[in-house]
């Protein structure tokens, strides 16, 4: 994505807390490890849907273990082009680097708030969004999805000393105060299934959601398994409630609908066939075990909160 687009995106996001303005120079892209922009087989990067040889992706950079921001390039972090002096890392960055290496692209990461991700890819501000998005039917009407690149069960998290710590199903959570991240399946579809739950205002980010639990503002939160595992890894006072495979699990109209909501994908603009195929060619060569191993690596190096 040309640097002009990065500049326009940064200016448009000055009102957002998630972006700090500014543009990246040629030093703001992470070299995938290949020289030039020629992919395997002698094809140019442009023939795979990335005309300038730079895959520009967007993420919140605040959604560990999928993605986060840090102050240096340790553990393979890459610069955030619209937030100078800040670096992105996490599962999304790790897998994006593999995609870029396979296609001979360089990688540019742009920080964006959650609600701006889909509009940004629709307007061409980003080439793709790699940000832990569920491949829901509603989103699929707006963008095309590559993947899945992870399979994420829906779980709850509470404190170890909570009266809900021994819950065996969602019915045992009745009466509790709870929340989840805004504009997610967890908040919109899962929490309403808990009869008698006192659903609070949605959290703007995953860290804000976890903070509400840690400070006692809510009794439990609903999220996906990687986010929950990462939170519990950083705080021994938290426990993950995983009801998957039991009668007490969250319910969906069909297994197809369940798959939509646990499959995590990468979104691109509608009709971006070449880019979609190039990304899927890499993901199709990976197994669920490969994804889980990479996620474990991300959790191991995530920053403490």
Image (cartoon, helix red, strand yellow):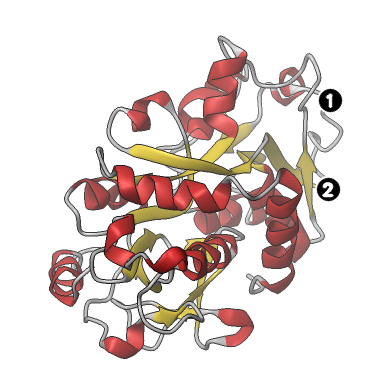
Q: Position of residue 152 (x, y in %)?
A: 64, 40
Who's the residue at 67% across and 65% down the image?
298
In this rendering, the answer to whether 297 lies above or below 255 is below
- In the rendered view, would you say 24 is above or below 196? below
Counting residues from the start of the chain, the first of labels 2 and 1 encountered is: 2
Q: Is residue 44 above or below residue 84?
A: above
Residue at the spot of label 2: 160
User: Going by the picture, which residue comes out furthest to the right?
Assistant: 166
Residue 86 falls left or right of residue 90: left
SS class, disc 2:
loop
| Quadrant into which the C terminus falls | bottom right
**Within the image, what quadrant is residue 242 found in?**
top right
Whether residue 61 is visible to the viewer of this picture, yes or no, is no
In the rendered image, the quadrant that contains the N terminus is: bottom left
Pick whichever, 5 or 170, lies toward us: 5
For residue 80, side relative to residue 181 (left or right): left
Q: Nearer the viewer, residue 191 or 300?
A: 300
Q: Point out residue 134 in the picture as x, y percentages from the top left corner.
A: 49, 37
Q: Residues within 10 Å of mark 2 (few under 14, many from 20)?
A: some
Q: Position of residue 161 (x, y in %)?
A: 84, 46
Residue drawn at (48%, 46%), measured in percent from left and top?
280
Residue identified by numbered label 1: 168
């Amino acid at each position: 994505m040309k640097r002009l687009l990065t500049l326009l995106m940064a200016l448009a996001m000055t009102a957002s807390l998630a972006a700090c303005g500014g543009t990246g120079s040629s030093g703001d892209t992470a070299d995938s490890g290949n020289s030039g922009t020629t992919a395997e087989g002698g094809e140019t990067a442009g023939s795979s849907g990335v005309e300038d040889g730079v895959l520009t992706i967007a993420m919140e950079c605040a959604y560990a273990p999928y993605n986060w921001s840090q102050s240096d390039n340790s553990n393979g972090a890459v610069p955030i082009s619209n937030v100078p002096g800040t670096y992105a890392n996490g599962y999304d960055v790790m897998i994006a680097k593999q995609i870029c290496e396979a296609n001979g692209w360089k990688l540019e990461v742009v920080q964006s708030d959650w609600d701006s991700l889909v509009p940004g890819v629709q307007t061409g501000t980003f080439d793709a969004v790699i940000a832990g998005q569920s491949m829901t039917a509603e989103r699929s009407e707006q963008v095309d999805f590559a993947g899945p690149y992870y399979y994420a069960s829906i779980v709850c998290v509470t404190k170890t000393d909570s009266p809900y710590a021994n819950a065996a199903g969602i019915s045992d959570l009745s009466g509790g105060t709870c929340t989840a991240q805004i504009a997610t399946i967890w908040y919109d579809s899962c929490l309403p299934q808990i009869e008698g739950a006192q659903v609070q205002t949605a959290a703007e980010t995953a860290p804000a959601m976890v903070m509400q639990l840690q400070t006692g503002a809510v009794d439990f939160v609903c999220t996906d398994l990687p986010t929950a595992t990462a939170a519990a890894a950083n705080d021994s006072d938290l426990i993950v409630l995983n009801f998957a495979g039991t009668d007490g699990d969250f319910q969906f109209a069909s297994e197809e609908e369940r798959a939509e909501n646990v499959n995590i994908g990468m979104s691109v603009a509608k009709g971006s066939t070449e880019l979609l195929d190039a990304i899927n060619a890499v993901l199709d060569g990976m197994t669920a075990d490969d994804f889980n191993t990479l996620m474990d690596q991300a959790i191991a190096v995530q920053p403490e909160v």
